[in-house]
């Protein structure tokens, strides 16, 4: 039940963006404030609402679940503030799945906290989506839960709260999916250890052999990889999950980034769908090599001037973008300095 296409109009900085024939891995690139994170959060809100509706004792309608998810994810005073400024503008969002179901809604600038979703074929999900932000959440997990679930205060948005809740599930014993087990071994091998929750101290720790280290003194990159490892180990993620990653390069050195993207490709081959937003030439280049080497269609969405977006495919070549152009300019500048030596 992966996402097949989307069409967003007047969604904050996203004046108009459309994606078709989405792949197992989808890349989003562009300058700051172009709406990359907005797009990730919009799609996450839809997917997570399909997963939370009708679970357990929750008796909210889908309209109520999605309204709440948008409100706590974007944390605007009222949902109408998400509508792109302009006379008579209305936010429109259509997300279609590969199983032919879809979610279609729109609202105006006067909307407060409740939206109405158009009637359509809609299948609720038993799998889980997750949003991985640039920063880790382990060292602030108790603060995030208190702010989001107890105080119900703005601060840490729903993507952070959902992630911390997902990490609360204990590690599962028994045989895991083969690709998950292999990926966990590689993730833990990157830093020769693993992140664990220590029930005796009620705290997260970094365990390396028989040594235990406080999560507060553990490197940011280790914690970030540990979060991914934990979600695979506690079975929160399954082969039908959708994972949204904002700036995977954050806090990781180039070798670790390359290894992480190799793992992402392996998980994508298990049917997990990825949406990745990045500023990194290194990430783009690595994904290009993976796409070419594996004959993989890898849609890329590029923020252009005047709020325009372009969809291309990384398999067809490195895209025209300022991230790429700046790297070329630096290379040419280096050649110029060598000529003067």
Image: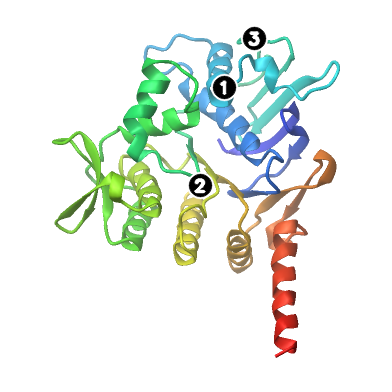
Observer-nearest of 209 and 62: 209
Task: Tell which circle, 2 or 1, labels the residue nearer the N-terminal end.
Answer: 1
Observer-nearest of 289 and 168: 168
Give the CA separation, mark 1 to mark 3: 12 Å
- Identified at 55% across, 49% down, the residue is 247
Residue 294: horizontal and vertical position, in percent? 58, 65
Q: Is residue 124 among what the camera can see?
A: no
Please give left or right for residue 238 compared with residue 82 in the image: left
- Classify 72 as above or below 262: above
Task: Tell which circle, 2 or 3, labels the residue nearer the N-terminal end.
Answer: 3
Split into 4 quadrants, where in the image is the N terminus?
top right
Residue 38: horizontal and vertical position, in percent? 64, 34
Residue 299: horizontal and vertical position, in percent? 68, 51
Give the CA separation, mark 2 to mark 3: 37 Å
- Identified at 56% across, 27% down, the residue is 45
Task: Identify the element where label 3 is drawn.
Answer: loop
Please give left or right for residue 179 compared with residue 288 in the image: left
- Near mark 1 (Cα within 10 A), the count class, few <14, some 14-19 or many ≥20, is some
- Identified at 50% across, 27% down, the residue is 157
Q: Is residue 60 among what the camera can see?
A: yes
- Identified at 47% across, 50% down, the residue is 270
In the picture of the structure, the residue carrying the numbered disc 2 is 271
- Classify 154 as above or below 1: above
* Res 11 → quadrant: top right
- Classify 104 as above or below 58: below
Residue 130: horizontal and vertical position, in percent? 47, 36
Task: Tell which circle, 1 or 3, labels the residue nearer the N-terminal end.
Answer: 1
In the picture of the structure, the residue carrying the numbered disc 3 is 112
Observer-nearest of 77 and 183: 77
In the picture of the structure, the residue carrying the numbered disc 1 is 75
Please give left or right for residue 98 compared with residue 226 in the image: right
**Closer to viewer: mark 2 or mark 1:** 1
């Amino acid at each position: 039940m992966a996402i097949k296409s989307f069409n967003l109009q007047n969604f904050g900085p996203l004046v108009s963006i459309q994606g078709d024939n989405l792949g197992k891995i989808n890349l989003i690139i562009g300058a700051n404030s172009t709406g990359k994170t907005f797009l990730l959060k919009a799609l996450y809100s839809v997917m997570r609402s399909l997963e939370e509706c009708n679970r357990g004792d929750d008796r909210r309608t889908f309209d109520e679940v999605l309204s709440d998810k948008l409100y706590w994810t974007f944390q605007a005073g009222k949902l109408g503030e998400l509508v792109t400024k302009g006379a008579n503008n209305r936010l429109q969002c259509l997300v279609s799945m590969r199983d032919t179901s879809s979610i279609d809604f729109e609202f105006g600038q006067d909307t407060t906290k409740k939206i109405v979703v158009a009637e359509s074929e809609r299948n609720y999900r038993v799998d889980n989506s997750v949003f991985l932000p640039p920063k880790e959440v382990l060292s602030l997990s108790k603060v995030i839960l208190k702010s989001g679930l107890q105080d119900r205060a703005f601060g840490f948005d729903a993507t952070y709260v959902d992630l911390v809740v997902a990490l609360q599930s204990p590690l599962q014993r028994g045989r895991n999916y083969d690709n998950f087990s292999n990926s966990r071994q590689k993730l833990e091998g990157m830093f020769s250890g693993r992140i664990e929750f220590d029930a005796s101290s009620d705290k997260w720790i970094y365990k390396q052999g028989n040594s235990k280290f406080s999560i507060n003194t553990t490197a940011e990159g280790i914690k970030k990889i540990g979060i991914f490892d934990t979600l695979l180990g506690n079975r929160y993620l399954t082969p039908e999950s959708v994972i949204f990653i904002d700036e995977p390069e954050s806090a990781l050195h180039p070798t670790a980034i390359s290894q992480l993207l190799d793992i992402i490709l392996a998980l994508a081959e298990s049917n997990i769908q990825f949406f990745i937003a990045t500023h990194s030439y290194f990430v783009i280049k690595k994904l290009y090599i993976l796409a070419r080497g594996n004959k993989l269609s890898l849609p890329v969405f590029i923020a252009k001037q005047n709020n325009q977006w372009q969809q291309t495919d990384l398999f067809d070549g490195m895209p025209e973008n300022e991230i790429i152009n700046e790297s070329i300019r630096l290379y040419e500048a280096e050649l110029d300095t060598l000529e003067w030596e």
